């Protein structure tokens, strides 16, 4: 299949969001966007979550890596926690969240269960699966451990609008709080298609309770993942997909809990009525007395298809010109940066043998980049890579499917 057509069809999967789900499968009615895409391409298809690993999240807190994976076995879902104190070389035995092997969880790559950690306190969140609800999507669920992941209890969730559904949650912890953002439709229907609102909450007691929610943007894309990063001054940066246009936007909640949208990250002016299921990657690098923001963003604009890297030295107000990684079929990406200057970006894209995961590296704060290297093996469908910095380098995780089973793939750099 032509790579451009492949991407455009992929981006159109939730234009009408006509999804119903029973027993782990979905029937999706699809039509392409009216702008920057071939017209009137329609199809119906079944999608079934694979056996194996269906959700991945990873974070680094005080040089301990915390890994959360969601698994499906014969239609039953479970969540598993592990940690590593040696940059991902070895891992603790997996602990099953809530000791449950049939969690009512609506999770998949791009709408993964999430994890945040503060010392021995670990908090995980996910969207509940409610059979018969629209898209079988329900309210957020949370679990919490105070003994470094050995035992787990159900916990309070960030939303104070409990009806739900709440999706595309992201969490990030610093020394002062655990921060969470997610999408929900508490404001009711919109005249625009595929719209939700971006909400924010924080917990100052390790996830026991959450403060009053703040609406950051009440008109956002309805089903793209969000990214949170905090700096050493108490600012919380959020990268999310906006509407009109559908470019990724960056905003910040400052120490006084004031919100400001700062910029579009790569002003591609892409206008898309549906939802492309593509978020972005963001990291913050300390540079002298200031810091530099690094971002990777995806767009479906016909003139700029694919994944692009940008950085900002003025707190996200302005960005460098976009640098494309991979080709026009690149879809999902992430980025991480060490304070010493090293930056790693990772993405997936089509190859002659299927979807594969790639990475590239910069040794000079994103000014120049190495040639891409393929991380995943040929013949697998490898997607949705995540990268985090470690003590000695970087750790990349993704999922890869061999036609029968989906597994976790990893690489240390």
Image: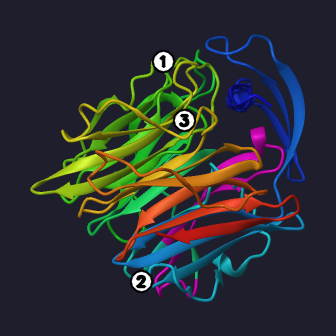
Can residue 164 be seen here?
no
Residue 38's spot in the image, x, y percent?
A: 73, 13
Q: Earlier in the sequence, mark 3 or mark 2?
A: 2
Q: CA distance from mark 3 to mark 1?
A: 20 Å
Q: Residue at x 57, y 64 (%)?
A: 397
Q: Which of the numbered marks, if any, corresponds to residue 150?
A: none
Q: Residue at x 70, y 24 (%)?
A: 15
Give yes or no for residue 276 being in the magenta stretch. no
Quadrant of the drawing holding the N terminus: top right
Q: CA distance from mark 2 to mark 1?
A: 42 Å
Asked whether the beta carbons under mark 3 and mark 1 sit within 8 Å of each other, the answer is: no
Which residues, given as a range, are shown in magenta? 123-151
Q: Residue at x 75, y 10 (%)?
A: 39
Q: Residue at x 67, y 30 (%)?
A: 11
Q: Which residue corresponds to mark 2?
A: 120
Q: Nearer the viewer, mark 2 or mark 1?
A: 1
Disc 3 crowd rating (10 Å Cα; few below 14, some 14-19, many 20+) is some
The kind of secondary structure element at disc 2 is loop
Q: Nearer the viewer, residue 289 or 19?
A: 289
Relative to 235, say whether 68 is above or below. below
Q: Which residue corresponds to mark 1?
A: 244
Relative to 99, say whether 6 is above or below. above
Q: Earlier in the sequence, mark 3 or mark 1?
A: 3
Q: Nearer the viewer, residue 363 or 397?
A: 363
Q: CA distance from mark 3 to mark 2?
A: 34 Å
Colour mode of the rendering: rainbow
Relative to 348, say whether 329 is above or below. above
Q: Earlier in the sequence, mark 2 or mark 1?
A: 2
Disc 2 crowd rating (10 Å Cα; few below 14, some 14-19, many 20+) is few
Can residue 65 be seen here?
yes
Give yes or no for residue 135 being in the magenta stretch. yes
Q: Which residue corresponds to mark 3?
A: 186
């Amino acid at each position: 299949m032509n790579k451009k057509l492949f991407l455009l069809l992929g981006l159109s999967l939730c234009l009408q969001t006509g999804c119903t789900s029973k027993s782990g499968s979905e029937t999706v009615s699809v039509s392409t966007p009216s702008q920057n895409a071939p017209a009137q391409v329609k199809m119906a298809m079944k999608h079934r979550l694979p056996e194996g690993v269906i959700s991945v999240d990873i974070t680094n807190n005080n040089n301990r890596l915390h890994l959360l994976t969601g698994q499906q076995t014969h239609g039953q879902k479970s969540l598993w926690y592990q940690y590593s104190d040696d940059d991902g070389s070895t891992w603790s035995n997996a602990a099953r969240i809530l000791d449950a092997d049939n969690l009512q969880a609506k999770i998949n790559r791009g709408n993964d269960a999430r994890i945040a950690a503060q010392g021995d306190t670990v908090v995980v969140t996910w969207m509940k699966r409610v059979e018969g609800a629209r898209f079988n999507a329900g309210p957020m669920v949370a679990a919490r451990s105070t003994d470094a992941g050995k035992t787990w209890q159900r916990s309070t969730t960030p939303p104070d609008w409990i009806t739900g559904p709440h999706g595309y949650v992201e969490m990030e912890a610093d020394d002062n709080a655990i921060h969470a953002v997610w999408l929900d439709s508490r404001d009711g229907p919109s005249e625009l298609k595929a719209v939700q609102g971006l909400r924010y909450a924080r917990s100052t007691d390790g996830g026991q309770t959450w403060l009053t929610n703040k609406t950051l943007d009440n008109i956002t894309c309805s089903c793209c993942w969000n990214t949170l990063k905090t700096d050493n001054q108490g600012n919380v940066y959020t990268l999310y997909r906006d509407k009109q246009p559908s470019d990724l936007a960056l905003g910040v909640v400052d120490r006084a809990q004031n919100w400001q949208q700062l910029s579009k990250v790569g002003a591609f002016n892409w206008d898309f009525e549906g939802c492309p299921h593509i978020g972005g990657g963001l990291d913050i690098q300390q540079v002298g007395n200031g810091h530099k923001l690094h971002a990777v963003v995806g767009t479906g604009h016909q003139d700029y298809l694919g994944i692009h890297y940008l950085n900002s030295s003025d707190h996200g107000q302005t960005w460098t010109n976009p640098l494309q990684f991979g080709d026009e079929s690149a879809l999902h990406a992430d980025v991480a940066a060490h304070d010493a200057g090293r930056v790693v970006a990772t993405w997936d894209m089509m190859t002659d043998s299927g979807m594969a995961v790639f990475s590239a590296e910069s040794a000079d704060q994103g000014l120049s980049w190495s040639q891409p290297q393929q991380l995943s093996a040929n013949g697998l469908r490898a997607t949705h890579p995540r990268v985090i910095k470690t003590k000695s380098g970087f750790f990349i995780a993704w999922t890869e499917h061999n036609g029968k089973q989906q597994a976790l793939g990893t690489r240390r750099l």
